[in-house]
Amino acid sequence: MNQTISARQLEEAYDTCGPAVYRLAMVYLGRPADAEDVTQETFVRLLCRAPVFADGEHRRKWLLQVTANLCRDQLRSFWHKRVTALADTLPAAPPEEREALAAVTALPEKYRLPIHLHYYEGYSVAEIAEILKLGQSAVKMRLKRGRELLKIELGGSV
């Protein structure tokens, strides 16, 4: 069952969850303009199709799941394949984190997303499995392999 949300509720949802939605889209897509488009579409869907949420964490998980689905759709689209990448830009990070952030964003998508959700957003394996629609064992394996790739990339300093 869908609910109608007020402008105040939408603004509160954006203030609390907007940065996490944008970061996930940025990790998924790698381009600020694409991440902004997906973030906007995610909150339009919240406005138009919001289910009844048990609490704020349920709403946050729903928003991240919608974001992941929209990113997957965009990556499969014809137009995404026709876009030429411009200079690589990342959100500003402290100098000591830049190397690690660059290594995480360079990971293949299937490892990058679980790593981001676990270490940057603080989700458990079960929550990541729900968001990405994977089994828990698949998430555990992707986290393990992602960490191994990061360890190689960062020269064993992980």
Image (cartoon, rainbow, N blue to C red):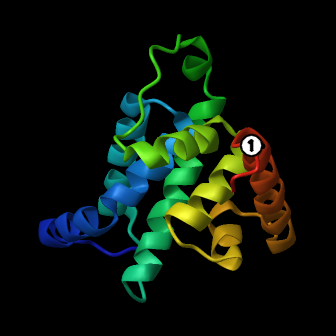
Name the residue: 45% across, 29% down.
31
- Rendered location of residue 84, percent (x, y): 53, 10
Quadrant occupied by the C terminus: bottom right
- Residue for badge 1: 155
Counting every numbered tag in the picture gives 1
Using the rendered image of the protein, determine whether residue 100 is visible from the camera's viewpoint.
yes
Q: Is residue 5 above or below residue 73?
A: below
- Rendered location of residue 2, percent (x, y): 40, 73
Which picture quadrant has residue 47?
A: bottom left
Using the rendered image of the protein, determine whether residue 71 is visible from the camera's viewpoint.
no
Q: Is residue 83 above or below residue 153?
A: above
Quadrant occupied by the N terminus: bottom left
Name the residue: 32% across, 52% down.
44
Mark 1 crowdedness (10 Å alpha carbons): few <14, some 14-19, many ≥20: few
Q: Is residue 132 above or below residue 53?
A: above
Q: Is residue 109 above or below residue 82?
A: below
Q: Nearer the viewer, residue 6 or 88?
A: 88
Residue 59 shown left or right of residue 149 in the figure:
left
Q: Nearer the viewer, residue 27 or 8?
A: 27
- Rendered location of residue 83, percent (x, y): 53, 13
Residue 147 shown left or right of residue 30 in the figure:
right
Which picture quadrant has residue 109?
A: top right
Secondary-structure class at tag 1:
loop
Q: Nearer the viewer, residue 143 or 99?
A: 99
Name the residue: 51% across, 57% down.
66
Q: Nearer the viewer, residue 53 or 98?
A: 98
- In the image, what residue type sits under mark 1? Gly
Which picture quadrant has residue 155?
A: top right
Name the residue: 37% across, 47% down.
94
Residue 149 shown left or right of residue 37 in the figure:
right
- Rendered location of residue 76, percent (x, y): 66, 31
